[in-house]
């Protein structure tokens, strides 16, 4: 049987019992899980299983599982498989009829959502945003019209830049930064995307962070004049045609293609020196 178990400082009694009875524990970093086992007074063989060796180590684990051994899968933090390796192993177990169960425990994404004060459902967990600004903005474009609270993992070094990109594409939505969850310096910082971008531009975050962004505001349908006004404002602020259209589409719920066509017309008219209709 394969059993994913979380490991974020909090651990359930069921997880401890499962570890005690496992034949093998697959973990990201054997030093991290070794310390956990030492604290629990357990001595179970550990196998490193992480994103760099998941294919090879996965085969080793499957061979053990096929022989009827009990393998527990542990992550360094939070819930295994959530931005951590493991889903392919679970799928193979399912395909081969090997029993799999999960032991719910701490999850940085869900803990951040709980503490954010933002609507708890529907929500969409989007994992890490891409590293480059262009790819990040493209990812934000794809999420702009999703009527849900959005949850992202982020590196503290990129937090300010990511917040600024999200503000540019999603509009100035309410958001919250959840830092060092379940640890000594746990902190929740609420604010709008623009406020938080400014704050973390000036003083980068420390430790581990989750970014939670509220859903787009439900509004009365925007008229064409309103759309053009918002577009003119975004373009005057220096945003590109594409970003302006995405922002206004996200703010108004109108089709991005339609808003882009209006933005194009506005830009052409402005280039000719004509009035905005
Ligand atoms: N599987 C883990 C989980 O479910 O929590 C997440 C692993 S992912 C590789 C690491 C990212 O999770 C970090 O960069 C951060 O965004 C988030 N994270 C993990 N632990 C955290 C904590 N204690 N406080 C805030 N964010 C955390």
Image: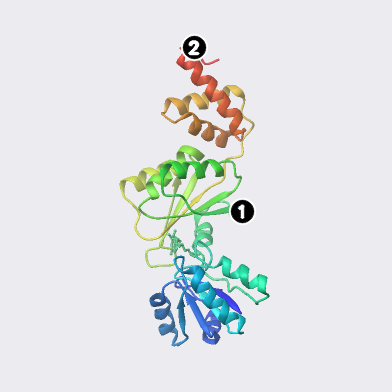
90 shown above or below 251: below
Q: Residue shown at 65%/77% (left/top)?
A: 98
Q: In the rendering, at what x and y percent does residue 192 appear?
A: 46, 43
Q: Observer-nearest residue: 208 or 193?
A: 208
Mark 2, residues whose alpha carbon is within 10 Å: few (<14), some, or many (≥20)?
A: few
Task: Determine which of the numbered discs, if any, sits on residue 121 in the image.
Answer: 1
Q: Residue shown at 35%/54% (left/top)?
A: 205
Q: In the rendering, at what x and y percent does residue 41 appear?
A: 44, 88
Q: Secondary structure at mark 1?
A: loop
Q: In the rendering, at what x and y percent does residue 228 appear?
A: 54, 23
Name the image quarter holding the N terminus: bottom right
Q: Residue shown at 50%/61% (left/top)?
A: 83
275 shown above or below 129: above
Give me the C-alpha separation between circle 1 and circle 2.
46 Å
Task: Answer with mark 1 or mark 2, whichever residue precedes in sequence.
Answer: 1
Q: Residue shown at 46%/26% (left/top)?
A: 235
Q: Quadrant of residue 125?
A: bottom right
Mark 1, residues whose alpha carbon is within 10 Å: few (<14), some, or many (≥20)?
A: few
For label 2, the residue is 274
Q: Is residue 129 visible?
A: yes
**Taking the image as four quarters, which one is ligand 1 found in?**
bottom left
Name the image quarter holding the C terminus: top right
Task: Determine which of the numbered discs, if any, sits on residue 242 in the image.
Answer: none
Q: In the rendering, at what x and y percent does residue 164 appear?
A: 41, 42
Q: For this view, does 251 lie left or right of residue 29?
A: right
Circle nearer the viewer, 1 or 2: 2
């Amino acid at each position: 049987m394969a059993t994913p178990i979380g490991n974020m400082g909090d651990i359930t009694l069921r997880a401890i019992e499962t570890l005690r009875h496992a034949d093998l524990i697959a973990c990201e970093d054997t030093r991290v899980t070794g310390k956990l086992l030492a604290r629990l007074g357990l001595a179970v063989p550990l196998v490193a299983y992480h994103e760099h060796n998941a294919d090879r180590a996965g085969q080793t684990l499957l061979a053990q599982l096929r022989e009827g051994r009990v393998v527990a899968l542990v992550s360094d933090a939070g819930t295994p498989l959530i931005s951590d390796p493991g889903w392919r192993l679970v799928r193979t177990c399912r395909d081969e009829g090997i029993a799999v169960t999960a032991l719910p425990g701490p999850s940085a994404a869900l803990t951040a959502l709980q503490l954010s004060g933002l609507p708890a459902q529907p929500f969409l967990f989007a994992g890490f945003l891409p590293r480059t600004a262009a790819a990040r903005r493209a990812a934000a474009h794809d999420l702009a019209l999703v009527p849900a609270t959005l949850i992202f993992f982020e590196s503290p070094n990129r937090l300010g830049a990511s917040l600024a990109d999200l503000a540019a594409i999603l509009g100035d939505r309410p958001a919250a930064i959840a830092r060092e969850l379940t640890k000594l310096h746990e902190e929740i910082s609420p604010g709008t995307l623009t406020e938080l971008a400014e704050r973390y531009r000036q003083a980068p975050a420390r430790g581990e962070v989750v970014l939670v962004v509220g859903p787009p505001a439900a509004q009365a349908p925007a008229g064409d004049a309103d759309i053009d006004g918002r577009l003119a404002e975004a373009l005057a602020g220096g945003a590109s045609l594409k970003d302006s259209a995405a922002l206004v589409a996200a703010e108004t719920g109108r089709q991005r293609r339609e808003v882009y066509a209006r933005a194009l017309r506005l830009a052409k008219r402005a280039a000719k020196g004509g009035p905005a209709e």
